[in-house]
Amino acid sequence: MPETTSDDGPAEGVQIDLISGERMTGKTSMEKIRLILDGVRDGNIVVLESGLTPDEESKLIEVTMSEINPDGFSGIEIESFPQSEASDTSLLGRLMGKQETSKLTVIGPANQIQSLHKDETLISALISRK
Amino acid sequence: MGLFAELRDSVSRVTASLFADDSEPKRIGIYGPPNAGKTTLANRIARDWTGDAVGPESHIPHETRRARRKEDVEIERNGKTVNIDIVDTPGVTTKVDYSEFLDHDMEKDEAVRRSREATEGVAEAMHWLREDVDGVIYVLDSTEDPFTQVNTMLIGIIESRELPVLILANKTDLEDSNIQRVSNAFPQHETIPLSALEGENMDEVYEKIAKYFG
C-alpha cells in the first residue's frame, strides 16, 4: 500500500492493532503482556478481542509500572466492557483448564489518549497523535 | 486452571486452614486509587487500637510510595477480638506522569524521583495483592466517580483470589459525597460509609472488620 504523504512528509497517524482471541491463545501471561506493551510503547492503540484474566491484568499493571520513565512512557489507559454472566466459563471449560475472559479491551498510551469513556455498550476514546 | 490444579489448590487451602494458627494476625491490605484516604484510615485504625500512626498523610497523590505494615492491631467488637496486621499500600493506577507533581510546587528532580518511587510502590502493591494479603479493605473517595477501570480491575483481581473484601466509601464529611454511587458500582459487595479524617462511623467499620476478617 502506498504511504500517505503530505507537503510536510509522511502523514503521522495512529495505528490501531485489533488482536484476535485466536492470536492470544496459547500465549503465556508474559507473552501477552509483552505483545500489548510493545504495541502501546510504539504509540499504538491495542484492542483485544478476548481481554485478560484478572491475574494477567494485575501483572500488566506491575510490568507497566516497571517500564514508566520520565522521558517517554508514562503508562497506559485501559478500558474493557464489564464481563457478562453469560460469558462465564462453562463446566467443561473449567475441567479443560480454560479460563473464559471474552471482554473487549482497549489499551493505549496514557499520554496520547486524552479521554477514554465507557458505559456498558460503548467505549469511546479520543486519541492524539504522537 | 485445570481440574487437577484446582483440586490441588483446594486440598492445600483446606490443609492450611486445618493447621492454621488462629492467633496469628491476618494481613489486611488497604487498597484503592490514589488520594482515597487509605493512609488516613490506616492511621485512624492504628491510633484507635495501638496509639501509633502508620505513616504521613497528604493531599499530594502518591504520598505513600511503599507498603507499610502495622503489626498486631487487636480490634475488639461485640465480645469478638480480631488480630490483624494493617498493610497500607500505595494508590493503584496504570499511569504516573512526573509533570503532575510539578503542580504541587516541586522541582523537576524531586518530581521525577517521586514518580519513580510511586511506580515502584504500585508494582509492590500489586505483588502484595497476589501473594501476601489475607483480606482487603478497599477505600474509595465517595466524592469521585467509582466507575473507573482501575477500580473494576482491582475488585476483579480481589474476587478472583477469593479474598474477603470490605468496600469503604470515604470522605462522607465532604459536600459532594455520594455513597449510593459507590454502592451502585459494586452491588455484589457491602459498602460502608465513613469519614476516616473525622472518625465518623468508625464503630460500624470496626464491626465489619471483625465480621469479615475475624
Image (cartoon, coloured by chain):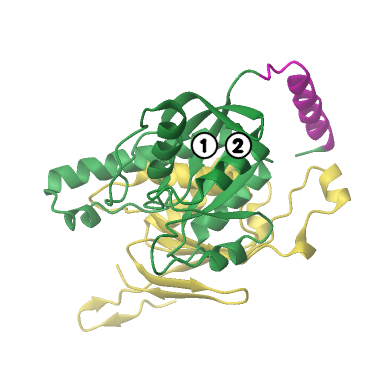
The residue carrying mark 2 is B135
* Residue B63 seen in the figure: yes
Mark 2 nearby-residue class (10 Å; few <14, some 14–19, many ≥20): many
Q: Quadrant of residue B21?
A: top right
Chain A representation colour: yellow
Numbered badge on residue B13: none
Q: Compared with residue A85, is residue B124 higher up or lower down, i.e. above or below?
A: above
For the point 59% across and 43% down, which residue is it? A29
Residue A79 rendering spot, x and y as whole percentages: 52, 64
Residue B15 rendering spot, x and y as whole percentages: 78, 20
Residue B4 painted magenta: yes
Highlighted range, magenta: B3-22
* Residue A28 seen in the figure: no
Q: Nearer the viewer, residue B74 or B8?
A: B74
Mark 1 nearby-residue class (10 Å; few <14, some 14–19, many ≥20): many
Indicate the quadrant containing the N terminus of chain B: top left, top right, bottom left or bottom right. top right
* Three-letter code, disc 1: Gly
For the point 61% across and 18% down, which residue is it? B24
Which type of secondary structure does the marked residue at label 2 adopt?
Answer: strand
Q: Nearer the viewer, residue B191 or B146?
A: B191
Q: Chain of mark 1?
A: B
Tell me which label, 1 or 2, sits earlier in the chain.
Answer: 1
* Three-letter code, disc 2: Gly
CA distance for labels 1 and 2: 6 Å
Decide if residue B152 is on the left or right side of residue A45: right
The residue carrying mark 1 is B29
Contact flag, marks 1 and 2 (Cβ < 8 Å)? yes
